[in-house]
Amino acid sequence: MTTITGIHHVAIQAKDYQATIKFYEALGLKRFHSWALPEFNIEYAALLNIPGTSSYVEIFDKNANVATQGRRPIAGETPVSGALLHLAFTVSNAAQAYEDALALGAASCIPPAALHLGEPVLSIRNALVYGLDGEVIEFIEPHALTVMA
């Protein structure tokens, strides 16, 4: 039986490949590997490592013919909704990560907040932004994930 041991990567098709790479590198990810694959019309692709983990964000150029969920957006159209809801990154300070992302060109989705969810109560601190390609990025503080009796 297969055992899943973690998330390897989340893939994004970038409207502006270089800008998207710079955005994620400015958020602390490190370029691990880059490639081209002409048989899939991939001129530029890269894996960016989340430091201290074996997890990655994979970035493809806008013309790459890669597997995708939903239908591809028509030119000028807002990305079409599908099953992938958001990328969630662990950060030490969700409010600071939110401000940093906005300064790098992201748009606000949900400002930093403390939430108290369910019974028993799970308290979290998080914030969400829209990345440069319409992807929803959540910043969540791991130490804020506490169950209250």
Image: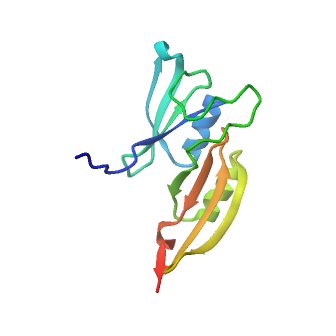
Residue at the extreme top:
39
Q: Taking 83 as reference, is 141 above or below it? A: below
Q: Taking 67 as reference, is 85 above or below it? A: below
Residue at the extreme right:
76
Residue at the extreme bottom:
149
Q: Quadrant of residue 72?
A: top right
Please state the horizontal and vertical placement of residue 59, each as a whole percent of the image: 53, 33
Looking at the picture, the colour scheme in use is: rainbow
**Side of 50 where 95 appears, left or right:** right
Q: Residue at x 58, y 26 (%)?
A: 61
Judge by depth and name the residue closer to the eye, 99 or 125. 125
Judge by depth and name the residue closer to the eye, 65 or 29. 65
Q: Quadrant of residue 77?
A: top right
Q: Residue at x 74, y 25 (%)?
A: 75
**Side of 126 where 99 appears, left or right:** right
Q: How many marks?
A: 0
Please state the horizontal and vertical placement of residue 76, each as a whole percent of the image: 77, 29
Q: Residue at x 64, y 57 (%)?
A: 128
Q: Taking 101 as reference, is 116 above or below it? A: below
Please state the horizontal and vertical placement of residue 114, each as a whole percent of the image: 62, 73
**Side of 131 where 47 appears, left or right:** left
Q: Residue at x 60, y 41 (%)?
A: 82
Please state the horizontal and vertical placement of residue 111, each as a whole percent of the image: 70, 62
